[in-house]
Amino acid sequence: MTTKPAFPDPVADSTVLDERSTARLDALYERLTSLRKVSIGYPCNHRFDFAPLYRFMEFAVNNLGDPFSGSNFRMNTHDFEREVIMTFARLTGIGNEDCWGYVTNGGTEGNMYGLYLAREIYPDGIVYFSEDTHYSVSKILRLQHTRNIMIRSGPTGEMDYRDLEESIRIHRDVPPIVFANAGTTMTGAIDRLDRIREVLERQCTPNAYIHVDAAFSGMILPFVDDPPPWHFGDGADSISISGHKMIGSPLPCGVAMVRKTHMERISRSVEYVGALDTTISGSRNAITPLMLWYALRLHGDEGFRELVGESLRKAAYAEKALNEIGVKAWRNPYSVTVVFPRPPKAIMDKWVLAGSGDIAHLIALPGVSWETLEEFIDDMQRETEKTA
């Protein structure tokens, strides 16, 4: 006997949900509204307003294919996506004519794309990545069956360049693919491309590839004075940046940026869609490019410079205030991530903190108010006094 699906019978007006389903949605909205006020441990900027774009939700849009090559399916936002990529090209130190990219569903896809190109260029290459690299990279390497070596990190989360050099020296006959971080997950550390390039030059490895995971700091470093070397102008071959972290978006998204000559090695034409097959996924979100375009236009460089400055000031305040109450907090230069000893579970749960081993962190994004930081510090002070 076939079991009847556990859905209510359709009502006469199919545009109106039944009361129980409506109540569930209302409860979800209330839960998310409450959590938004205390979520300070993960890099999701909640300060955004895309109301002017809601009207586009009535269209079945799809950014199928290469945004720069056109497609038979014209219900897309490719023209806006191209402008997004060109803006990021400027921010990451590369000319429009030398750059190619597309809007991804998040940082992991951007990292996968960069490592995919690296493997196509150097099929026998070895990927070197630090132990502080995002967990998704190990998964990508398993999926791609790519040889890899994990490199030690220093106490701040930055790559240990001596360990990198020793590992490359041992495998000098194999092209190195270096996976660098511009803002590690837990500590916001930056792997300096000048130090990495010095290692490659000393080991005489002209055939090398550098991918940069700038998921978070890719929208911080362009707006600070004298940032460490991290982008195309400093030697990167590909870069991944998230859109929902510093910029803010209700939908996860990001950009994959590569040198155009690398992309041209893997592109092929697909007759069915009349487009070049250069992206990882075929069908792609057409709303997130519109949201990124809107945010980039709305804020502009000066607006983002103000948002980044505000976040850095909040991070500096939180670091100082925590130390004043006896909590040994610290942060890396150019980082809005404040690291401190892992607090009790009640604090971790209430403030939706991210932890790793014996440390935890808060992230002072624009959507985190000064009042929220003060309330968190008060909670930490009460906990400190309780255990003193």
Image (cartoon, grey):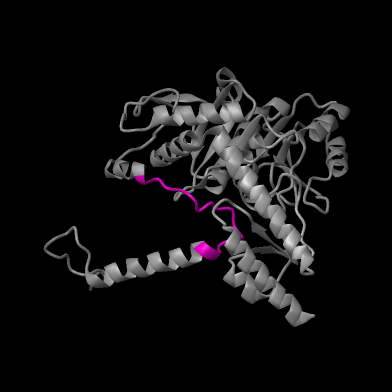
From the viewer's side, name the closer residue of 116 and 212. Answer: 212
From the viewer's side, name the closer residue of 311 and 251. Answer: 311
Magenta stretch: includes residue 366? no
Q: Residue extending furthest top?
A: 97
In which quadrant of the rendered view does residue 208 lie?
top right
Q: Position of residue 320 (x, y in %)?
A: 75, 59
Magenta: main secondary structure equals loop
Q: Is residue 62 visible?
A: yes
Q: Quadrant of the N terminus?
A: bottom left
Looking at the image, residue 49 lies above or below residue 379 = above
Q: Is residue 232 left or right of residue 59?
A: right
Residue ID at (34%, 28%): 272
Magenta stretch: includes residue 42? yes
Q: Is residue 170 left or right of residue 103?
A: right
In which quadrant of the rendered view does residue 56 lie?
top left
Q: Is residue 341 left or right of residue 119?
A: right
Q: Quadrant of the C terminus?
A: bottom right
Q: Is residue 2 visible?
A: no
Q: Residue extending furthest left?
A: 12
Q: Position of residue 59 (x, y in %)?
A: 28, 41
Q: How many marks?
A: 0
Q: Position of residue 313 (x, y in %)?
A: 67, 50
Q: Position of residue 89 (x, y in %)?
A: 58, 27
From the viewer's side, name the closer residue of 311 and 281. Answer: 311
In the image, the segment drawn in magenta is 37-51
